[in-house]
Image (cartoon, coloured by chain):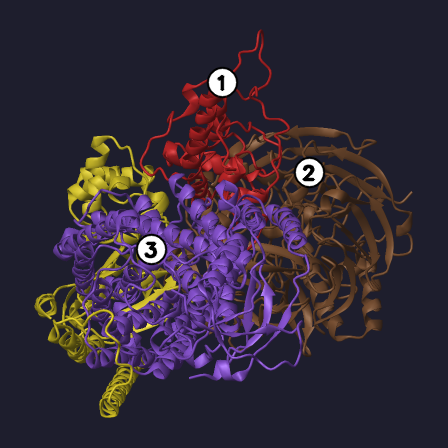
Amino acid sequence: MMRSRLALVILLAACSGRQNALDPASAQNRSITALFWAMFVVAAFIWFVVTVAFLVPAVRQRRTTREDAEPALELPAETSRRQTRLVSGATAVTVLILLVFLIYDFGVGRALATHPARALTIELVGHQWWWEVHYADPDPSKIVIDADELHVPVGQSVQIKLVSRDVIHSFWVPNLIGKRDLIPGYTSSIFFTADRPGVYRAQCAEFCGHQHAKMALDVVAHPAPEFSAWLERQRAPAADPSDSLAANGKRVFLSAACSKCHAITGVEAYGTVGPNLTHLATRRTLAAGTLPNTRGNLGGWIVDPQSIKPGARMPSNQLESRDLVALLAYLETLK
Amino acid sequence: MNDGVRAGRARSSVDQEDAVLPPPQLIDRERLEADARQLDVTWRDPGGLWGWLTTVDHKSIAKRYIITAFLMFIAGGIQAAMIRMQLALPENNLLGPDRYNQIFTTHGTTMMFLFAVPIMNAMGLYFVPLMVGARTIAFPRLNAFGYYAYLVGVVFLYVSLFLNTGPDAGWTAYVPLAGPQFSPGHRVDVWAQVVTFTEIAALAAAVNIIVTALKMRAPGMSLNRIPLFVWAQLVVSFMIVFAMPAVATASTLMLAADRAVSTHWFNPAEGGDSLLWQHVFWFFGHPEVYIIFLPGLGMVTPIVETFCRRRVFGYDALVLANITTGFFSFGLWVHHMFATPIPELGQSLFTAASMLIAIPTGIQIFCWIATMWSGRPRLTTPMLFVLGFLFTFVIGGLTGVMLASVTFDKQAHDTFFVVSHLHYVLLGGAVMPLFGAFYFWFPKVTGRLLSETLGKWNVWLFVIGVNVAFFPMHILGLNGMPRRIYTYLAETGWGPLNLLATAGAVVIVVSVVIFIVNVAVSWRGGALAGPNPWASSGLEWATTSPAPSYNFVHTPVVLGRHPLWDSVGPFPVITGLRTDRREVLVTTVFDARPDHRHKEPDASIWPFVLSLAMGVTWIGSIFTPWAVPTGFAMTLLVMLGWGWQSSRVTDVERVETEDRLVEAE
Amino acid sequence: MSLRCRNAGWKRGARRTSGVRLAALMASVVLIAGCEREARRFQESPPTASPTGDPLVVSDLQPGPAVVVSNVEAPYDDNAWAVSEGKSLYNAMNCSGCHFQGGGGIGPPLMDDDWTYGSEPQQVFASIAEGRPNGMPAWKFMLSAQQIWEITSYVRSLSGLNPKGARNARDDHMMRKPPEASTPNARPKNSTAPR
Amino acid sequence: MQRRQCAWVRIQSRLLLHASAAAFCALAIACKGDRGAQPVALVARTGPASPSGDSTSTFADDGQWVRPAKDVQATRFSGLTEITNKNVQNLRAVATFSTAVNRGHEAAPIVANNTMYIVTPFPNFVYALDLTKEGFPAKWTYKPHPVSAAQGVACCDVVNRGLVFDGGRLYFNTLDARTIALDAATGKELWVTPLGNINIGESITMAPLVVKGKVIVGVSGSEFGIRGWIKALDAGSGRVVWTAYHTGPDKDVLIGPSFKPFYAMDRGKDLGVSSWPADQWKIGGGGVWGWVSYDPELDLIYYGTANPGPWNPEVRPGDNKWTVTLFARRPDNGEAVWAYQLTPHDLHDYDGVNENILVDLQWKGQQRKVLLRPDRNGYFYVMDRATGEVLSAEPYGFVNTSTGVDLKTGRLQYNPEKEVKTGQVVRYMCPAAPGMKDWQPSAYSPRTGLVYIPHQNLCMDEEGLEANYIAGTPYVGTNVKMYAGPGGRRGSFDAWDPIAAHKVWSIEEDFPVWSGALVTAGDVAFYGTMDGWFKAVDARSGKALWQFKTGSGIIGQPMTYKGNDGKQYVAVLAGVGGWAGAIVAGGLDARDSSAALGFVNAMRDLPEKTTKGGMLYVFALP
């Protein structure tokens, strides 16, 4: 009990954060959290009662009966009747509680299952070990392809279409919505409506190989106008570098291995093996939420990714320091 | 202890058909000792290495089974410790992702397939015959074969692990990750075949226990008098018979075939289905959990009875709870797949079922508590383990109810919340009763008692350790920490609680070390126990500790649910089984009336040889499909040898009994 | 233990005299082989960034006394993981665009026993790194030596030139051909380097 | 003078087409009376064959064969009548000539001024054979020495589809994307114009068309993510006069004010950009490697563009303009007059490069200038070549990838069950990637009014893959496995009635009929098979009349001419290869069913039936 109260304190303390199921930032998760707390309180109470129920007889009688004491096999009828009543009563209560839980859960389930006809559709493609994001649009030339970061408008229902091209991954933003697996051969969808701007951390929740641990995704919820502005910016191709260093970096990017796997819109780089880098500089993290997006980290990632994400598909690149500096300068222009 | 007992003598049908039965008589000491000597000659297996390899004594086989499985518990525990060490700090570099994946996969595989199921089977194989008053188990050779098959699996897995070929796709081996494209090499093949071995072993044990419990019970032990431990074992054995073939199919026929001979069961491109694996696997995987902890619950009852000096409350309720749990457990598997694209309605159905199963479990707990209230619990180590079990398992059960809810499960699924839940259920529901059982039955196996002082340390540290190690994981899960990650970033803030969990793990390790010391010391040096140290009620206590190779000099006769408590005065037995050959009494399924006498086989090397042949087959199949036909041919030959040897006519003699004896109350 | 021991290991073993030590060595070799077969080396720079430094022979014909060329051992021929990495590179870098799954098309077949520029590891490496005149591009500026070695081993596995246990089984795509693991070893008819 | 005559003839023929068969004969005689040409030859004439004023290519002269398609209307019809369905069985080989090249020979030999000219596959040798001397000895040989690396960017064997004679000059293209003009008499190189860059996958395999002093050339490489274009070079200097791209903004596509597509789906600004995902149009394919035909009267060139890249359609949502599109352009400045996208958002590599046969037909009671087009997507299109309206589009084989063409919107109606999906094998898509009919040109006979279509009958399984673009490497992104279509015969040679839109007769062949067709006024149709039989059949009944076994499979284009001895000769190049013959030409391994884009799987038995080797065969009556 002592420990459980302590735990309760920790639990309450741990109820906030950018990757926390109990800190809801969406209508859907609010109802789930409510359900959780309801179940938690009831469960804690039951556990408390049961614990008391078996500890009392245990501590009540310290005087131990002699081992060979002839066991009293037949209890007084009245006692056993009382016991029967108690046990069947407890059972009945159990059934009742379960029934309530069940109905409550169905209710929440229905609420989550219903979603508006028109929702912003975003396709999320899972790769070992990064996320590819497509912002759908009826006009093909307006489709935006991004990676490792998911932007959604606040207050608008969002449909995430989940696709995997290799193994099973699982999309899970604790603050916004529960899990949905990305299963090869299946296309499934999940809906949610963020109701609070902020940055929420999602992490692949189905074991997907060596770098399962470092396959994260920042979900950024903007106010609607801010979101559409952001989307508009994303549609723009990469601007041509102004200064010579960056221009040189662009040359490096195209002549070195980079462009064989990575695409930059507006440049002759169309690789699809790795993430699209058109707006790399605007991203908050590198290597699927593994490193903050800083020049130093970027350099380290380019030169020796295998010590950061062992097993990742990104090869280490031996670049002249001159070229590396130029390349970094160029990549930083990709706003 | 059998001196001065009355015996209703059962005559064989060979001598005069319709004679009136003489009144029961006392068996004198000379007769008793003569029979014992004779039986010892008949039943003792040859000594030496040869004897060690050929023995079919269910007790020595089961003893090895238990010891091997416990070694697996230690191995899995070491892996668990490594996992906890790696996760103690954020961005820790103790184990790389590659090593870590092998370790956690082997941990899961070991604990589920090589420790939990086998040790529960083994307890059954040791005690079921004793508890039902049989001379031995129904199929002694099959029993031996099962153990060796299991042993091959154990050795294979660990040799592979040390060759850097440990499975690394998780103990659930989800495809496509475990499939041929994303798991090149032989790591996952090893997993698939290890699973095959344990399945075969489990099935052998299950069949054995079913037949023993249904056909070899002592006269008078009608169904409604079967001890609850035996009931649990019986139910679990039936579950094994239905569940294990599923995973055998999935791992051996589908996954291994996909990997070895390019079948397309799980290849979505060619029309296969990657979800199929999860369905088939969890159709086994969920009952698996109950296969592991129902025997645990079965162990709780005799301990509670013995140390409360009371008959357990609600025998019928407990039996029915066991059976219903067994049934329901097959209707829950989809709650492991709530995050996959499965129709809402179907999910709700499985939610309902998953919650339903809490009811029988609840009833059992209520019954034990009621028993304790009516009695005066003696807080011996076994009893303390039972209390620890109640304390811990209830938490696991309640989080289980939470997880049954689709909506919440999608938040908790595949996170440390689930890790925590399943460890609460398995450590609390199975391992704690198991430790209790170790303390309770150790004297019966070795003839000596375990040290109570060390025992107290053991139990307290274990219960505290488990809760400190696993409770924080609930919070970690809700804070977004997924399962099976080899490290995590500092800014996630998961560090402190992980450190706490690791500390708890250390406490568990200490506790287990104490247990090992306790066993090591007490095996030879412990206080002598005598036949029935706890003044308990089961038949297993009606013979010497350790029990002789023939278990009982004369087959006991049961007059109630608690034979040793029920029979006032001399203990009733029946005589008439031949002592010059391995003969057992086969009784009827329902009322356990003596039906006929059956000759059990003698010691044999064939089970050992067969398991080797099978081992070659399956392990070879990893490297070339041709190993399968050749291996099968080899296996067939060995089976011929086996059959040849045991083809000597085993004459069955009908036994006539007068109802008075078995009906006696 | 049917894990294959690597030639080097056997040679070393052969020189031992004491049977016991031999046995011990065998055991360790088996162990090494096992580790080798299943190892996942993410972070290493394999030997010789480019084999041009080493003697590379594409013609069997040598004027005067023939120099015996020591073959560079392919670092990944015996490593299942690296071979499968080689396969994913083979597809990602569009090798499959011309050679398909070994049957060939724009480029020659790779699963048969006919090798225009030699089947030895360093010859295959050279073909990939330096390119070949009749349409094979030069990849050495695009791929690291490690990647080229991985592809080399995969290419050799297409005609079963590397140990069976290290070859790929079927992938999760259309079944285009029997997987490398069950491709018969096609002994190169006209591989040129001394063997 | 000449022009007025034709004008007169044209008027006559118009009347004639209203008139009865009797009147037809009458006019035939009349014509014979006033000019010495073959009467039947006149009927199909719709204007001067070549505006270049070069005497050798006036319609009057059927003795020569100056371009692969015979005339700019691409009829592949010869008015020569010496060889008829009565005497063709006496045909015998009179000369052969080895080309010294072993890859697929898709070119047509051409004849002008008693000289035969041949262009071989890579390395694109050009031979001039003197037809006046016995055994047709070589006059001269020209070797362009194309870059050998170019073989690495030829998707479907290193073929060349022929050269053109015009005004005493020869024009042809090399695999490494150069156009070369030679002096036909001496073989002297007049000019060389590099047009493409093999490092981005550009190559040229087509035969140029020369009209109004312009050499029209298009690029190959839609399987390499090129940005397709067609160029006009000044025949005199080789200077590029205009370039039209087939993706991108209107100004690059040369879409201007005079652009009037018939259907709404082809109207709109910069469709070449807006019908693609960002930047995808830059690597969107749409080359031109097939046939260009010309209508001197409307002064329009007609050609279709190739498939979009990559094959996997999920990578390129949208209509992907202007790939798989039929263009009508002005030869002078290249401006587009109309366009019609035959296969919007192509799913199955149904390039639109097939020949367009320009004839005048009696359509629903009125005379119309039409364009006949057996398309790769399985439909035989009859279109109004002035407006781009589709008059009819009927399948000429088994099609299940689409349900038809909506004549109101002009859109091809896809069958959703046969759409290519990433990571999932879709089975039994018919026709397969090579289409119902690939490059192999058909012929039209005004005497029978039938189109003679050599084509294949293949279906395929296909799986979409993630495609990665690396300049100069294939950009396809699919697994394909082809096999014989319904009936199990992989090819057929059909006679199709464009007006009634039905098959008149059909000859099934075991292998795809990958050779061109030829039909003559003697009512004989010629074609070759991939197992090396050169066949003559009755143009009216389809009855097999004569066949000859050549040294290698035939994928070339048969032609006929009149020698200076006055005899009619028939010539064809043997030499198996091409996409269909790659298994033999490239020595591919059939264990891999996806080899050569899946075609190998359908041709496993070809190596047993034929071997490679280029050889010219010339036939004549004894």
Task: Give the SS element for disc 3.
Answer: loop
Q: Quadrant of residue A137?
A: bottom left
- Disc on res. B447: 3
> For this rendering, which residue is in front, C26 or B220?
B220
When asked about the image quadrant of residue B461, the answer is: bottom left
Q: What is the x, y in percent for residue D347?
A: 51, 62
Asked whether the residues under marks 3 and 1 belong to the same chain, the reply is: no
Residue D134 can be seen, yes or no: yes
Seen at 74% across and 64% down, the residue is: D487
Which tint was used for chain C? red
Residue indicated by mark 2: D118
Dots 3 and 2 on the same chain: no
Instruction: Tell which of D514 and B644 is nearer to you.
Output: B644
Identity of the amino acid at label 3? Gly
Label number found at residue C70: 1
Q: Nearer the viewer, residue D64 or B152?
A: B152
The tint of chain B in the picture is purple
Chain for disc number 3? B
The quadrant of the rendering that contains the C terminus of chain B is: bottom left
Where's the N terminus of chain B, which quadrant?
bottom left
Q: From the viewer's perspective, is the residue at label 3 or at label 1 nearer?
A: 3
How many C-alpha atoms fall within 10 Å of the one at disc 1: few (<14), some, or many (≥20)?
Answer: few
For numbered disc 2, what is the local secondary structure? strand
Q: Which mark is residue B290?
A: none
State the separation of the CA atoms marked 3 and 1.
70 Å
Parent chain of label 1: C
Chain letter for brown, please.
D
- Across the whole image, how many numbered discs are drawn on residues? 3
Chain letter of mark 2 equals D
- At which x and y percent is residue B66? 38, 54
Instruction: From the image, state whether disc 3 or disc 2 is nearer to you.
Output: 3
Q: Report if the CB atoms under discs 2 and 1 are less than 8 Å apart.
A: no
